[in-house]
Image: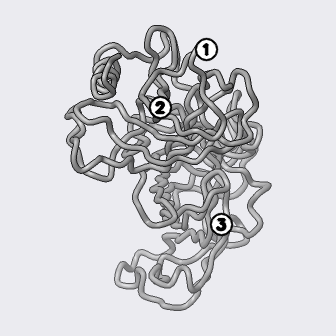
Amino acid sequence: MIPKIKIVAMTILLVTVCCTHAKGQAAPTTILTVDLENVVNYQLDTSDISKFASDPNVTTTRPVGAAGGLPGSFLFNAQIGDIVAVNGQPAKGTFTRHNFQLGLRTAPSFGQAIADTVRGRVEADTFEILKSDGTPIGTIVAYGLSGGSPPPGAPLSRTVGNFAIVGGTGAFLGARGQAGVAVTAQTIAIRQASVTEDPANRRRNGGGRARFVLQVIPMEAPQVVITAGFPFVIHSRDSSLVTAYNPAAAGETLRLFVSGLGPTKLPVDPGQPFPASPAAAVNSPVDVTVNGKSATVVAAVGLPGAVDRYQVDVQVPSDTAKGIAAVQLNAAWIQGPVVNIPVQ
């Protein structure tokens, strides 16, 4: 009989040397719905820089167009808002936008620009996302055009805007995709303010609400590694591999060997192996579902001595039906591909 310590050593060796992703598996697209509150658009309506951010009160600014006297093109604006939820889960963070007004119209009025498309502004957006406890997760950067119809192939919940996701940091390193606004979810209009208003009082003075829909294609999605054509999942009781002849049981704790969970709370240089002690806990929120039902994640840490390999201990829901169970990982709300394991 092989001693347990040798089984564990063999497991680690297999994970670090032999395990690979499922061949041909492309990073899946994930839809992130980001909700904002206290959104204020500060309009550059004066050239006197001594007045910038100086007024503690709520300010107003002249509207754009013939009635307001300001042209519909070539105005600069800065927008700030609070991230309060991602995919309906509480979150924190800051949304910032720098925009340059163009007023593109096929039939322009005063101060607008004639064009073959209808757009409002060219904009650069950042979504710096934190956990609800304030732990930084990462930033997504998008650049594009506001207003008008979404591009072909956009998520159906997106109703306005044409933005390309051009990158990200942290858990979203290397992300790409497209983004826009779900106007139907904007229950309070974004407040328009003068650049003279002090943004330190933004939350007290109040602002609008907005919902962004981000179609994110990650550089690497979280996924269970594959060995010999099977998901690398072991029983925590004896480190044996979960197979059709050695199935999992409802309620038991399994260990998943996975990749693509991103940074850890313990800083580790990119490309360097994770330490054995202390354990390098994964920084992003990690969720596991079994047959679509949330499972309890006991721990998610970097695999000691490995690069981009992690071990996730998860308890199978006690009411999981016998048969083949679908297991899916999510890290920082990014979905991984489904793998199947037998449950007896």
Q: Nearer the viewer, residue 276 or 82?
A: 276
Answer left or right for 289 relative to 16: right
Q: Can residue 162 be seen at all in this image of the molecule?
A: no
Q: Residues within 10 Å of mark 1 (few under 14, many from 20)?
A: few
Residue 335 to residue 6: above or below: below
Q: Amino acid at mark 1?
A: Ala
Q: Amino acid at mark 2?
A: Leu
Q: Can residue 212 be seen at all in this image of the molecule?
A: yes
Q: How many marks?
A: 3
Give the residue displayed 72% in from the left and 50% down from the top. Answer: 182
Quadrant in the rendering for residue 18: top left
Eye-nearest disc, 2 or 3: 2
Spatial CA span between label 1 and label 3: 67 Å
Give the residue displayed 53% in from the left and 39% down from the top. Answer: 253
Quadrant in the rendering for residue 1: top left
Describe the element under mark 1 as helix, strand or loop.
loop
The residue labelled by disc 2 is 256
Its colouring scheme is one colour
Marked residue nearer the N-terminal end (2 or 3):
3
Marked residue nearer the N-terminal end (1 or 2):
1
Q: Residues within 10 Å of mark 2 (few under 14, many from 20)?
A: many
Provide residue 105's location: percent of width, then percent of height: 70, 45
The residue labelled by disc 3 is 64
Describe the element under mark 2 as helix, strand or loop.
strand
The residue labelled by disc 1 is 244
Q: Nearer the viewer, residue 117 or 259?
A: 259
